[in-house]
């Protein structure tokens, strides 16, 4: 995951936290509560997940030779910035079993089910918010600023939204599940003078009640970034 499952989803937006005075955030729900939605990410110490990660081409066909194994273990909890958060320990392995990388990240969960992720030990970023309601798009992060450099205007904007959709059936190596589909979308634009550059980064998660994520599909319009799929292979609970 780098931490693949969640670091990738906030990697692009975490840099904007350095300019926190120039951005606005709205993590409050925009729709009715949905108490029927169960625990979409149980943070229980020693719960372990194993995923298969691989790249896909433009037609979503698997690219041979890109498989990795991703082992995620929920570690102990501690209080950080007033939140009870669990350490997530993530190990990524090459297909031959050799360790590729080891990473950690903290994830906190509110009583209403909101899942927040700590980015680079800077701030907790609200991520999954079931209380916003099914099908209601909510704002996670908005950044908009203009700078002047050597007389040339430089405008940077970014907006991250989330939406939890109805359950649907999803098939992965670990089995068939009825899962809520969650979409996180980041839209960025940069204007230097009159030159506009824009990109979209999207992650689709399938969350199963009392289990957590079982599949993630990541796409990006930016050149040099491959589409990736992560599928649950096994769990220990």
Image: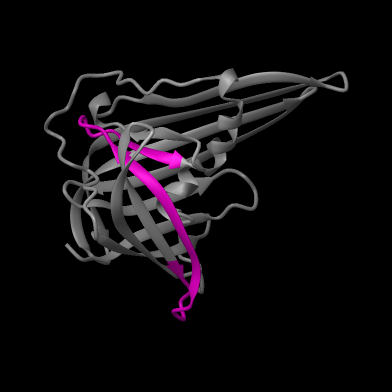
Q: Main secondary structure of the magenta part?
A: strand
**Residue extending farthest right:** 150
Q: Is residue 105 magenta?
A: yes
Residue lying at 24% horizontally and 46% vertically, measured from the top left: 41
Q: Where is residue 145 in the image (x, y as percent from the top left)?
A: 65, 19
State left or right for residue 153 relative to residue 88. right
Q: In this view, does 50 lie above or below 194?
A: below
Work out whether residue 121 or residue 30 is closer to the camera in this orientation and state it: 121
State left or right for residue 227 relative to residue 224. left
Q: Indicate the quadrant containing the C terminus: top left, top right, bottom left or bottom right.
A: bottom left
Q: Where is residue 31 in the image (x, y as percent from the top left)?
A: 26, 19
Q: In this view, does 190 lie above or below 10?
A: above
State left or right for residue 203 relative to residue 200. left
Work out whether residue 138 or residue 210 is closer to the camera in this orientation and state it: 210
Q: Position of residue 159 (x, y in %)?
A: 51, 27
Residue lying at 47% horizontally and 26% vertically, measured from the top left: 141
Residue lying at 49% horizontally and 48% vertically, measured from the top left: 8
Q: Position of residue 55 (x, y in %)?
A: 49, 62
Would you identify the image quadrant in which residue 116 lies? Answer: top left
From this viewpoint, is residue 133 visible?
no
Residue lying at 42% horizontally and 29% vertically, measured from the top left: 161
Would you identify the image quadrant in which residue 182 lies? Answer: top left
**Residue extending farthest left:** 36
Q: What stretch is highlighted in magenta?
A: 92-118
Q: In this view, does 156 lie above or below 94?
A: above
- Total marks in image: 0
Q: Does the magenta stretch include residue 198?
A: no
Work out whether residue 144 or residue 188 is closer to the camera in this orientation and state it: 144
């Amino acid at each position: 995951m780098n931490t693949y499952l969640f670091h990738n989803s906030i990697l692009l937006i975490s840099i904007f936290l350095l300019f926190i005075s120039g951005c606005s955030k709205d993590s409050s729900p925009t729709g009715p509560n949905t108490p029927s939605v169960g625990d979409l990410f149980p943070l229980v110490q020693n719960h372990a997940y194993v995923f298969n990660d691989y790249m896909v081409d433009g037609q979503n066909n698997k690219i041979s030779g890109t498989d990795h194994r991703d082992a995620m273990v929920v570690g102990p909890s501690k209080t950080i910035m007033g939140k009870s958060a669990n350490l997530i320990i993530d190990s990524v392995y090459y297909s031959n079993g050799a360790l590729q990388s080891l990473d950690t990240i903290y994830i906190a969960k509110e009583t209403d089910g909101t899942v927040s992720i700590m980015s680079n030990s800077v701030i907790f970023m609200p991520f999954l918010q079931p209380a916003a309601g099914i099908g209601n798009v909510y704002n996670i992060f908005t950044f908009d600023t203009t700078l002047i450099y050597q007389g040339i205007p430089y405008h940077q904007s970014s907006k991250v939204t989330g939406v939890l959709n109805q359950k649907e059936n999803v098939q992965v190596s670990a089995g068939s599940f009825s899962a809520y589909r969650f979409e996180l979308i980041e839209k960025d634009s940069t204007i230097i003078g009159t030159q506009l550059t824009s990109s979209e980064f999207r992650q689709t998660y399938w969350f199963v009640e009392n289990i957590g994520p079982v599949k993630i599909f990541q796409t990006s319009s930016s050149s040099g970034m491959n589409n990736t799929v992560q599928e649950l292979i096994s769990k220990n609970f």
